[in-house]
Image (cartoon, rainbow, N blue to C red):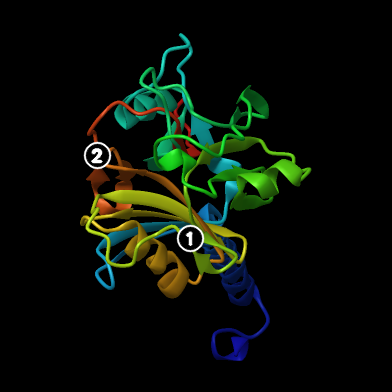
Amino acid sequence: MFDQFCVYGEGCSVYLEYLKTSVKILSALLIINLGIASTYAESSVRVFQVKKPILADVVEIGDFKNLKLHLNDTNHQPYQFISRLSADLQKNCRTMQFAMNAGMYHADLSPVGLYIEGAVEEKALNRATRGFGNFLIQPNGVLAWNHTQAKVETTQSYAKSSFKALYATQSGPMLVINGQINPNFIKNSDSLKIRNGVGIKDGKLYFVITNERVSFYNFADYFKTTLGVKNALYLDGSVSSAYIGELKRNDQLRPLGPIVAYSQVFNCR
């Protein structure tokens, strides 16, 4: 191919130098492009909306290193609102892509059950099985994860495990247990609310918040039948809130207790 442009001599040398320079430029561009592509691939977050069988927003997460629980700010006061958490993360050079209320809490916004943040257990596992409220509809359960693995399981199962959680929150009731809808749910119930929950499948977490009022049964059935998860946990109803940047969703309904958020570091210095 080179013979079309030069035979041996000065002209050929110049052309070869031109080729070398061009190759270097193309290589640099290729590296840059590959870097951008891998950054998106490594985020391991997928967002989508569903219209059937229920109206809902879904966030699939497989990267647990950037998924954290948040309750109090540096002044030991509850964040209360996702917007306040986002602003705090921004100050620490992190941009939030997703956030959601994550577990039952008392009037003072403190967790009702187990709460682990940064490997520190701030509230012990709540083993109560009788009482009033959704948290005590049996079985209730735990969402827990570390950098490499996540779990969604009943409180009883979690209590027997030796899982080393970096983050954990307890809520209730379980929506799906070992592939079966919680038997306490009524199929044709007229108790309809905006609800949110989390399920696990193939090592990935699926956070779901509805865009219409649904029953416990229909919400659980979405996890079981459509998403195909084996275990799913109810996070709350009525106060259900989420920030999903890609969907331009930014709920600021009521003060929240524990908040789960996915954020990534950016260069802000």
Q: Is residue 247 left or right of residue 104?
A: left
Q: Which residue is mark 2?
A: 251
Of residue 189 and residue 249, the one placed in the foreground of this image is 189
Can residue 237 be seen here? The reply is yes
Q: Position of residue 71 (x, y in %)?
A: 47, 24
Q: Which residue is mark 1?
A: 182
Q: Secondary structure at mark 1?
A: loop
Measure the C-alpha gap from mark 1 to mark 2. 28 Å
Above or below, 180 against 12 in this view is above
Residue plotted at (31% across, 42% down): 240
Q: Is residue 135 left or right of residue 204?
A: left
Of residue 79 and residue 235, the one placed in the foreground of this image is 235
Residue plotted at (64% across, 71% down): 13
Q: Amino acid at mark 2?
A: Asp
Of residue 154 and residue 4, the one placed in the foreground of this image is 154
Residue plotted at (58% across, 71% down): 19
Q: Amino acid at mark 1?
A: Asn
